[in-house]
Amino acid sequence: MKLLKNKFVLLSPIIVLAVVMIFSLTMIPSVNPKPENLPIALVNQDQGVMLPDQSKLNMGQTIMEQIRKKAEPASGKKPTIEWVSVKNQKEVKKGMDEHEYYAALVIPKDFSKKQASLQTPNPSSSEVMILINQGMNTMASTAASQMLNGIVNHINDNMRTQVLSGIEKKGGTLSTKQAAVLASPIKNVVTEVHATGSHSANGNAPISLFQPLWMASIAGAAIVSLMLNKISFSNRIQKFVNQLVQVLIGAVLAIIAGFGLTWVADAIGLNIPDFTNIALFLSIAFFSFFLMISAVLSWLGMKGLPLFVITLFFGVPLLSMAPEFMSAFYRNWIYSWLPMRFMVDGLRELFFFDKGLNWDHPTVVLVGIGLVSFVVFVASALKVKQDREKEHQFQQ
């Protein structure tokens, strides 16, 4: 019965409930994600057409106005799609390369001309092009694709109704050719830009690589920190020298982790477009995380370790989502402060955007995190005097 008198046993229900409540919060972002202000480019290249009555028809402009009007949100709500007018496909491609648009709807030059032909004996279907920036984010690009296809289908239905109504008013009948074209007066041509391809974990390869690297960086920093804590230092210089050795060990571990993880990923079938660049980037990410975790442990001790485990559980659901699918709280106060999101962004560049390893934003941020962490880590050498004083007081 002594076990029942133990205070930890008595507190165990509260502890278990607290753990359940805390980790249940990680499910909130993915329960019912809905996009807000999802940026999609809209290109109208339609040159219009002159009708027999000398009036000009520009169906492209009409469709753009209808899309924007339909997209207007109810009072107090944010729109699902943020339509961005872009001049041409070249500008769209540039924007997609720079992660500005998840998709684009392009209306071609001869759109009105072909639409006007629907009521003639020689009709022809017009086309609109849907560009999907698949590599930017799988969830967002899939949602954008579904919404754009839905919009085109809606326009198709309206167009078919208008044409049939016009022919009926004139007392005409449909030819076999007209009937075939009116089955789909507007054809949508879907093109995937920065396609994720096969063997990419459904476009989530960057997130798949994050989890083992993050856990390895926690394990590496914890083991080396424990080794350092067992050593007694008589002055700050000795601790500083040992800290530099710890940093060098971290650099070696980073190379092993980066190249080792890339080799394992390649061996199990993940499509690795550039082995060396991805391995080097993973090494940079590991070293940055290693320094950050070591810096926290140097000041807080092993009490700081759960912080990074909790960060993993809260971070993984968010890393697979586009920011536009998150609530304002998660987007501004959790996602914005996750250091691992820069690793995932950098891996997306390497996997799907063919940019290679360069001094881009994710790399700069990871290096910056590493440098700041190094300074904080080295500053912990100042604790040597405080630790000695505490030890002296304890002996007295």
Image (cartoon, rainbow, N blue to C red):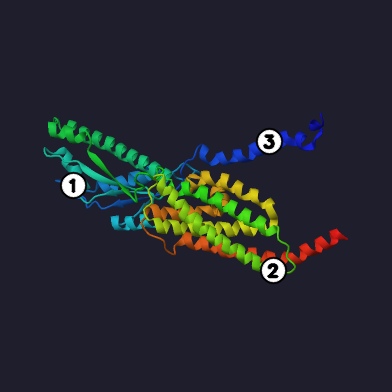
Amino acid at the residue labelled 3: Val
Residue 371 vs residue 199: left or right? Answer: right
Up-down relation of residue 124 to residue 258 (above or below): above
For the residue labelled by badge 1, is the local secondary structure a helix, a strand or a loop? Answer: helix
Q: Does residue 342 appear anywhere in the picture?
A: no
Amino acid at the residue labelled 1: Lys
Report how far apart the C-alphas of labels 1 and 2 lie in the structure: 81 Å
Image location (x, y in percent) of residue 144: 38, 44
Up-down relation of residue 144 to residue 226 (above or below): above
For the residue labelled by badge 2, is the local secondary structure a helix, a strand or a loop? Answer: helix
383 and 75: which is toward the camera: 383
Q: Point out the residue furthest to the bottom here.
A: 237
Image location (x, y in percent) of residue 22: 63, 40
351 and 132: which is toward the camera: 351
Q: Sort mark 3 into few (<14), some (14-19) or many (20+) by Cα contacts within 10 Å.
A: few
Q: Sort mark 2 into few (<14), some (14-19) or many (20+) by Cα contacts within 10 Å.
A: few
Report how far apart the C-alphas of labels 3 and 2 lie in the structure: 43 Å
User: In this rendering, which labeled residue sits more in front, label 1 or label 2?
Assistant: 2
Q: Earlier in the sequence, mark 3 or mark 2?
A: 3
Q: Residue at x 57, y 61 (%)?
A: 249
Determine contact: label 1, label 2, CB under 8 Å: no
66 and 204: which is toward the camera: 204
Q: Which residue bears the numbered disc 2?
A: 238
Quarter of the image with the C terminus in it: bottom right
Q: Which residue bears the numbered disc 1?
A: 113
Q: Residue at x 20, y 35 (%)?
A: 182
Residue 64 vs residue 50: left or right? Answer: right
